[in-house]
Amino acid sequence: MDFHLLDMENWERREYYTHYINEVVCTYSITVDMDITGLEGQKLYPAML
């Protein structure tokens, strides 16, 4: 895959890009099952990092 620099002044999708990059709060989240039985006696937060 090649990288192509966009000419933002003449790009036909510029208004859509600027709307989403400036106005829409994009977040990602994930839910997983974790077996933490072996972490007895350890602090949970540092272990999750």
Image (cartoon, rainbow, N blue to C red):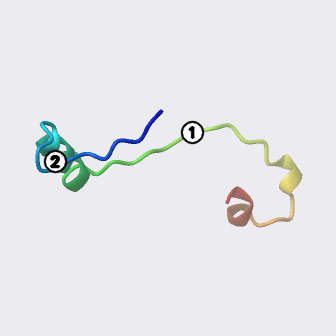
Residue position marked by numbered label 2 in the rendering: 19
Query: Is tag 2's residue or tag 1's residue first in the polypeptide sequence?
Result: 2
Amino acid type at mark 2: His
Residue 30 percent location from the top left of the image: 53, 41
Q: Secondary structure at mark 2?
A: helix
How many C-alpha atoms fall within 10 Å of the one at disc 2: few (<14), some, or many (≥20)? few
Q: Quadrant of residue 31?
A: top right
Residue displayed at 72% across by 61% down: 44
Mark 1: secondary structure: loop
**Residue 43 appears left or right of 40:** left
- Closest to the observer: 12 or 42? 12
Q: Nearer the viewer, mark 2 or mark 1?
A: 2
Q: Quadrant of the C terminus?
A: bottom right
Which sits in the foreground, 6 or 22? 6
- Residue type beneath disc 1: Thr
Q: Nearer the viewer, residue 30 or 19?
A: 19
User: How crowded is the residue under tag 1: few (<14 C-alpha within 10 Å), some, or many (20+)?
Assistant: few
| Residue at 16% in and 37% down | 13
| Label pair 2/1, CB-CB below 8 angstroms | no
Q: Nearer the viewer, residue 2 or 21?
A: 2
What residue appears at the point 82 percent right and 65 percent down from the top-left corner? 42
Vertically, is 43 above or below 2?
below
Give the residue number, with chain letter if any, for mark 1.
Answer: 31
Residue at image location 68% in from the left, 37% down from the top: 33
Residue 2: x, y in percent?
Answer: 44, 36
Report the side of 39 relative to 25 (left or right).
right
The x and y percentages for residue 18 are 18, 50
Q: Using the numbered discs, state the Cα–Cα distance from disc 2 to disc 1 in whole angstroms.
A: 28 Å
